[in-house]
Amino acid sequence: MTVARINRIAEYEGQSVQMNGWVYNSRRSGKIGFLMLRDGFGLIQCIVAKNDVGEENFDVFKSLTQESSVSVNGEVVKNERAPGGFEIITTDLSLHQLSSEYPISPKEHGTDFLMNHRHLWLRSKRQHAILRVRHEIIKAVRDFFDSNDFTLCDSPIFTPNAAEGTSTLFGTEYFG
């Protein structure tokens, strides 16, 4: 089965694919559920119907927590109402790792808390969008310099303070 990425999902319309990722959120009503899957490239909605996946897989779906890692097999169909315009009609669901309680919720958190959980905070839509914009800016600057035959030089960073408390400061004749 073809392993697809969310940013290229339109290429697989009408095909059966496997999607690997993390649970962004899920909700269910009776014998049907909706799973938002994140793979690092975007989000896609997966329709999980008890009749299509079976009793055992539907029980797995009901037990999923935010950021659990899963693989979803199913058919890619176009749906204008779905986020991104496509969704997956799930035929099989595999749980790789059930996540413990996710510490970052939609409520406001302080800077200290967010910095202590930076690896999780970067998974939010806003932070991910900021990283993508930053990437494009850095790429454009680098492409400009590359196209104008500049050479990249990674110089050491001089600072007046000891970083992390484990380094030793040394004198530098900067102004001559």
Image (cartoon, rainbow, N blue to C red):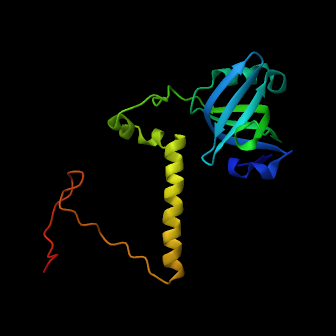
Q: Residue at x 74, y 22 (%)?
A: 58
Please state if 107 lies on the left or on the right of 52 as rendered: left
Q: Residue at x 83, y 47 (%)?
A: 13
The answer to which quarter of the image holds residue 67 is: top right
Please state if 147 lies on the left or on the right of 115 as rendered: right
Please state if 67 lies on the left or on the right of 122 as rendered: right
Q: Residue furthest bottom?
A: 149
Q: Residue furthest front?
A: 81
The answer to which quarter of the image holds residue 47 is: top right
In the image, residue 40 above or below residue 26: below
Q: Residue at x 81, y 22 (%)?
A: 54
Q: Residue at x 39, y 32 (%)?
A: 109
* Coordinates of residue 164 in the picture (x, y in percent): 24, 51
Please state if 141 lies on the left or on the right of 12 as rendered: left
* Coordinates of residue 37 in the picture (x, y in percent): 66, 37
Q: Residue furthest top?
A: 30
Could you say which is closer to the camera, residue 118 or residue 169? Answer: 118
Quarter in which the C terminus is drawn:
bottom left
The answer to which quarter of the image holds residue 62 is: top right
In the image, residue 174 above or below residue 80: below
